[in-house]
């Protein structure tokens, strides 16, 4: 029964890690395809560009970091380390 629980926990850890990577990839695509193109068409001031990029990237990095930390913690529990 413990082996089955460990396998399920490892699967959950892999899902969390995959979602964190997908979040980073999707955020990168959004910045490249939407945000930067929006800067070209509207030509906002430099301060607004920096603010927009920070308000896009910081939450994405936070969500990805939390996903990776959750994956790490679940993997530790699966291997009996935590």
Image (cartoon, rainbow, N blue to C red):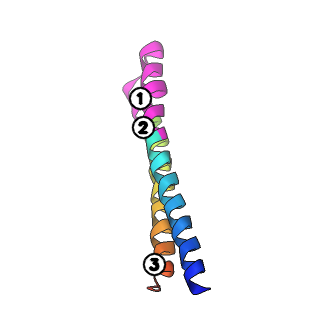
Q: Report, in whole angstroms, how far the alpha carbon at label 3 lies from the one at label 1.
A: 35 Å
Q: If you read the primary sequence from the N terminus, does the residue marked by circle 3 or circle 1 appear first?
A: 1
- Residue under circle 2? 28
Q: Is residue 49 part of the magenta span, yes or no?
A: yes
Task: Find numbered disc 3 in the image and state the secondary structure of the residue it sits on.
Answer: helix
- CB under 8 Å between discs 3 and 1: no
Where does residue 12 sit, x and y in percent of width and height? 56, 66
- Mark nearest the camera among 3 and 1 is 3
Task: Find numbered disc 1 in the image and state the secondary structure of the residue it sits on.
Answer: helix
The residue at 44%/20% (across/down) is 37
Mark 2 is surrounded, within 10 Å at the Cα level, by few (under 14), some (14 to 19) or many (20 or more) other residues, namely some
Query: Is 54 above or below relative to 67?
Result: above
Residue stretch rendered in magenta on the structure: 26-50
Q: Report, in whole angstroms, how far the alpha carbon at label 3 lies from the one at label 2.
A: 29 Å
- Residue 44 visible in the shown view: no
- Mark nearest the camera among 3 and 2 is 3
- Residue under circle 1? 32
Q: Is residue 77 part of the magenta span, yes or no?
A: no
């Amino acid at each position: 029964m413990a082996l089955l629980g460990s396998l399920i926990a490892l699967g959950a850890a892999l899902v969390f890690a995959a979602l964190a990577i997908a979040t980073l990839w999707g955020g990168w695509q959004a910045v490249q395809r939407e945000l930067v193109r929006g800067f070209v068409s509207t030509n906002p001031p430099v301060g607004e560009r920096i603010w927009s990029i920070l308000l896009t990237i910081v939450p994405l990095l936070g969500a990805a970091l939390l996903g990776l930390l959750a994956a790490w913690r679940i993997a530790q529990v699966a291997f009996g380390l935590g």
